[in-house]
Image: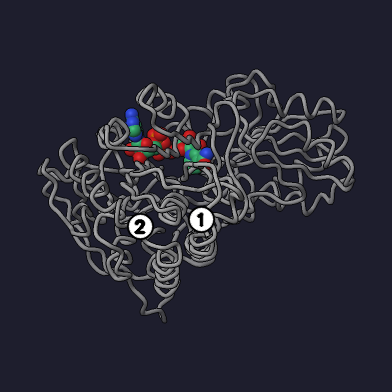
Amino acid sequence: MAKHAEKAESTTNPELKFGGVWKYDPAPESTDHVVIAPRHELFVGGQWVKPKSGEYFATIDPATERPLSEVALALDKDVDAAVKAAQKAFPAWRARSGEDRARYLFRIARMLLERAREFAVLETLDNGKPIKETRDTDVPLAAQHFFYHAGWADKLELLFPGERPEPLGVVGQVIPWNFPLLMAAWKVAPALAAGNTVVLKPAETSPLTALRLCELFQQAGLPPGVVNVVTGDGRTGQALVRHPGLAKVAFTGSTEVGKEIQKAVAGRGVELTLELGGKAAHLVFEDAALDQAVEGVVRGIFFNQGHVCCAGSRLLVQESVHDLFVDKLRRRMQRIRVGNPLDKNTDMGAIHSRPQLERIRELVAAGVDEGASLHQAQCELPAKGFWYAPTMLTGVAMSHRVAREEIFGPVLSVLTFRTPEEAVEKANNTSYGLSAGIWTDKGARILWLAERMRAGVVWHNTFNRFDAASPFGGFQESGFGREGGRQGLRAYVRLQGGLLPG
Ligand code: NAD
């Protein structure tokens, strides 16, 4: 298996038992539950099919290390069958009216909301993130993406006036583990709205919600082959992006794999969008509403255990308020509740996998070695599972690894600046360029900074706010292309030029 082998364990271990009924809420009065099948097959041509590889792998709950289910491993022949199913479905799907395609997307969105609780629990179990976030962010936002793109499906000509937007064909989509359901929705909804067909490859350590989404596709009556889901590790992803039947590849994941994919599709005339890593600067000026800024910074780095590509992981504080702000942050961090992700009062859940936990530990140790001071919230962490306390490193210099490399965990690196010019220079001193945040009371300063910061998204006096209508994407090593809004749909159409008849 690939790098997350310790979450996706081999099923040859006879001790592993899968599935069962999971309690939704540890509160004794709750009777809600979600049933997880002990085995999940591939979703190809509208059917559940066994993998030609004959192999399965386990997905586990990172909060307890308990196996949840075994999942089919798709290799070359399975991926080929999925692409062929999508090719077969394409002519009829593209020929449908936009209104007709919209009807399916609306139906999927509504069904997702009707089963919101089940999806939230499943996502929390498979990923480790708190139920508060899956319930209030992941599931509603995923549904919003289907609603939003349903709204555009019959209005694409209005979106691209004077042009004739045509679908591209079969789209191969590869997604990461940090927002499994949301990333699936970000990818699938615009592709279908524009008339493409899809082969989706979820991350090997969090495939369950994408697979459950297939139940909704079936119940919504989506024609067979319009969406196919192949599960597996990097080999599955490689087989998909190299397949000659694709018209486009859309990838969200690490910069390292993004570069490999760029090479794999080069010279083939395949459209490509890459949503990769980040190391966002989060700027706090002395005139900011500091207590609100503390909340924004906490949300910026500790939301989703910091497993967020656009996390505000580099805090730049104006020198005059550094000590005061750090003190406020330290006290606030102490109040973050870390623990059982299914408890509705939990703020921070489990780290997604053991390799991810090891990477966080390694980078924090490097930060301390290089001279940073370590501040960790004092909290009791569960004995089983993968856990890390909310952490802040102060006295960080631009040359430190913790200021340059993506940690992808609940670790904030704190630096200082004196002037707005220095703040911009430090913020832009990165190989990434996905997001940034600004806290100041001065509107003119926000505009001045936003013009100069090289980041795809710049939030001011807030952080980590998402909307389907708002384009999201990066510069430099954070990738290219946008998801969401008009720009997101643009990536799924070929503009033919010329007005539509009639
Ligand atoms: P990853 O790159 O290891 O894996 C992402 C996906 O690619 C997985 O499904 C994996 O199986 C697949 N894959 C692995 N090797 C492949 C290959 N050679 N060819 C094709 N597919 C392959 O990333 P991850 O560890 O799952 O996710 C974390 C990374 O994702 C972080 O760097 C994070 O910043 C980034 N991310 C970016 C965004 C964004 O919108 N920019 C959003 C979420 C996560």
Q: Earlier in the sequence, mark 2 or mark 1?
A: 2
Name the foreground residue: 441 vs 79: 79
> In the image, residue 211 lies at what x, y percent?
29, 57
> In the image, residue 372 lies at what x, y percent?
65, 26
Residue on which the image places disc 1 = 501
Residue on which the image places disc 2 = 95
Q: Secondary structure at mark 2?
A: helix
Q: Is residue 280 above or below residue 426?
A: below
Name the foreground residue: 239 vs 141: 239
Q: Amino acid at mark 2?
A: Ala
Give the number of callouts: 2
Q: Are marks 2 and 1 in contact (CB under 8 Å)?
A: no
Q: Nearer the viewer, mark 2 or mark 1?
A: 1
Name the foreground residue: 43 vs 253: 43
Looking at the rendered image, the quarter that the N terminus falls into is top left
Q: Amino acid at mark 1?
A: Pro
Q: Secondary structure at mark 1?
A: loop
